[in-house]
Amino acid sequence: MDSEGEAQVWVRIDGAGADAEILQMLADELRAELLVLDVDGVTQVVGDEHAPGARGLEWASIGILLVSIKNTTELIGQLVATVRTWLGRRSRPRAVEMTVGDRTLRLTDASDDQQDRLIDEFIHAIAQQ
């Protein structure tokens, strides 16, 4: 991982069964929490942008955020931890996907041990890029 460069992290809220208003509320809440971190920016994806996991429906992009950060393992770890904590405080959504380059991490309501292992593997794989 290039510690001098920047990374683009796609964060997609799995809004299965949620309407556009709820997805917008969830995206706004998560965006506010991510902005507290040492990020360069957090923007909401607009309908015609092509985010990983986007399904072509314009309203589905409401739950997608693009986070610009310095490309360091520490910051990516903080970002993952923040999303995981945010997700844990909600009954819905049940999952959030984070994509950096060609690596995607799906945070769910799986056990802490399972999530810890997946997060470690994800951060390790990104660090090797």
Image (cartoon, helix red, strand yellow):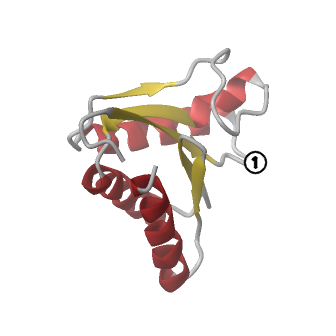
Q: Nearer the viewer, residue 51 or 13?
A: 51
Q: Is residue 117 above or below residue 53?
A: below
Image quadrant in which you'd find residue 105:
bottom right
Q: Residue at x 42, y 61 (%)?
A: 123
Q: Is residue 35 above or below residue 108?
A: above
Pointer 1 local density, CA inside 10 Å: few below 14, some 14–19, many at least 20 = few
Q: State the residue position of label 1.
A: 17
Residue 117 on image: x %, y %: 50, 77
Q: Nearer the viewer, residue 125 or 69?
A: 125
In the picture as drawn, the residue positioned furthest to the right comes out as 56
Q: Is residue 80 above or below residue 45?
A: below
Q: Residue at x 78, y 25 (%)?
A: 57
Q: Residue at x 66, y 18 (%)?
A: 47
Left or right relative to 10: residue 50: right
Q: Nearer the viewer, residue 33 or 98?
A: 98
Q: Amino acid at mark 1?
A: Gly
Could you say whether the residue bearing mark 1 is in a helix, strand or loop?
loop
Residue 62 on image: x %, y %: 60, 29
Q: Nearer the viewer, residue 31 or 19?
A: 31
Q: Residue at x 40, y 41 (%)?
A: 29
Residue 104 on image: x %, y %: 59, 52
Residue 122 on image: x %, y %: 50, 62
